[in-house]
Amino acid sequence: MPERTRPQAPLLTRFWTASSAPSDAAAPSAERTQHASVRDPSVTPPPEPPTQSIGGILQELLAQGRADAGRADPTLPELAASEPITDIARIEARIRALAAYEAPALLRTTTGVVRGRLVAALSDGPFPLQITATSPIPDAPFEVELHGYNSIYRFSVTRIIRIRDRVAVPLPARLVRMQNRASRRADAPAGYSISFTHPVLPELNVRRPMRDISSNGLSFDTRVDQDMVCAGLRLRDIVVTTPLGATLHFDAEVRIVHPPREGRGATCGLRLRPSTEADALRWNQVVGSVLNPTTRLGATWSEDTWSLYTASGYFSLSGKAQAHFGALKAPFATAARKVDAAPQVGCQVVWPSERGVEASISLLKVYEHSWFGFQIAKRQGAPPDGHTGRQVLRDIHLRAFEHAQTDPDLRWTTGLIQASAQWSKLVHYDLAQRYADSGFAAVVDFHALEIDVPLRVAKLDPNVGLASEDERDVLLDALVARRPWAYRQALDLVPERFDLLTLKALWAKAGLTRERELLVVRNGTKVIAAATVESADVGLHLFKLLDVVRLYAVSVDGVHAFPALLDAAAAWYRARGRASFTCLLEEGTPACASRLSPRDLGAGALTVLSTNLLPSFLEHLYEVTAPRLSRN
């Protein structure tokens, strides 16, 4: 219950119940009536404040700069963009996944709503879907609404057959997907509470149990007539208290207030902004452990993760062996500890079990608005605790990408996918390819070459050198027609972010280094080819895909200058103490590196996905990792 310093309940109740009355409507003073007998008649009481509606309160808050005008909750299903799905293979795959999870189902009729679950696998016949409910299921027609990971799927039903306590319905020819929310939420653990002082009524101190949590917010049980919360209200220094009495501090904004429904009281949803980096770190740990209790973050697992890379065959990729990585073990552990202490830079997620680490994935913020996923490894078979291998892969991905979603600057996620990696292709490549024409995703093919830095670098072509600002702009202008917009934005191939200054400062704060420069080949004063050369701490990426070169032909014959650029790149890495680097060849042929005797790592693709599509990616992940479901 709210804590107050004086009996304000009757007055506060009027703020809510008078919402249909004019804001200046008169009302009896309950406080004056209750306490008249104890007041000194010689003292003239102060005038009562005018009764206000909830709308009046919001106007007051707007005038004081404590609330924001406009729609409060952009995550409401009605406001989310819808995607009609008519491809029958996609519809079948998505509904089979929903059935495997026994997705919650709402059957909407003109007279009400029936709650149930989609419980049957697809089978042959005209009525392959089966729904069960806790109350009688009406006759058709009705609308079916299935709830997935973070999306709602709707379709119409005009025919049914009854099978005991179930109804069977046809597979829809058209499915409408509506994004429900950008980030997942879960019930708050018992014992968590929230408290704050009302920003307009400082005598009102509110303390309530939390109902659910997500990476960027929470909701709590509320009594609106007592707590006086409304959408747009900004709260300062709210306190979340854990069952053990620890406290976390935030500023917050009320995004929505849900009225009582379905036997549950009203709820208030907040968007949170941690007061300190320590609060942000602790909140991420709390949310991560609640949403993904089987996974862990942290460098404490680096030894077990190294063993995982051996057991899973990760060290055998691209023709390598464990012996190639021995010198990187200590730098790997050091880099993991630094990343663990700087969640704003990256994360390493593991699934621990009694035999060590079952699976792992890492994410790093490698550009100002982009996070890069890499080093995905999983032991063969299912873990000994009864979980499936699919669940293991699903949960480490969810924990990692939900961690990245806490970055307010996140705009893109990227990955480097080997052509032969079936899992990565299914999860990361296919979705990006589907949306590549929209501008919100990109897929760029490459051929990867690993190049040793010679002990003695050959004499460099005098026409090769570091680019000037004008020469940098020549390349960036040329790329407008040659690379997708999403690629250029995600890789910071734009003038205002090319030097990575903001990112370098973020990494430096974590004790890490990130560097990029541009080499060009000139024909007189004209740039004919260019190469971006990038580096990061040894041990962060075991295949050295952060020490990477990309070559670009600016003129028609620019590819002929690639060998000279690779010689200059080798000198650049040698000056930084690197023994080798990787060239991601997006144009030209591997022959351009022949005099450096490269090791061919094979074909692959860079995938880029906008955060606008990240909820779709996580829904897609849920689909492809659904439990196997046999046809009936």
Image (spheres, helix red, strand yellow):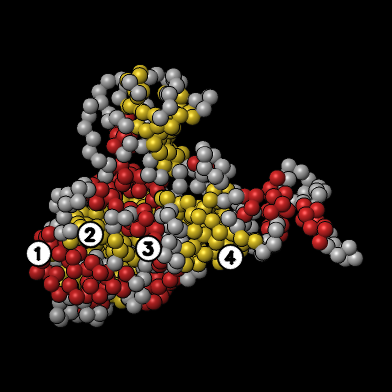
Confirm whether residue 506 shows in the render: yes
Q: How far apart are marks 2 and 4 (CA)?
A: 38 Å
Q: In this view, does 93 lie above or below 159?
A: below
Confirm whether residue 404 shows in the render: no
Give, as a three-letter code, the residue at label 1: Ala
Please tell me the numbered disc located at residue 352. Answer: 2
Q: Do the numbered discs 2 and 1 sit on residues whose CB atoms are within 8 Å?
A: no
Q: Distance between the residues labelled 1 and 3?
A: 35 Å
Give, as a three-letter code, the residue at label 4: Arg
Looking at the image, which is closer to me, 48 or 609? 48
Q: Distance between the residues labelled 3 and 2?
A: 16 Å
Mark 4, secondary structure of its residue: strand
Q: How far apart are marks 2 and 1 (CA)?
A: 24 Å
- First of labels 4, 1 by sequence position: 4
Q: Name the residue under label 4.
A: 236
Q: Distance between the residues labelled 4 and 1?
A: 55 Å
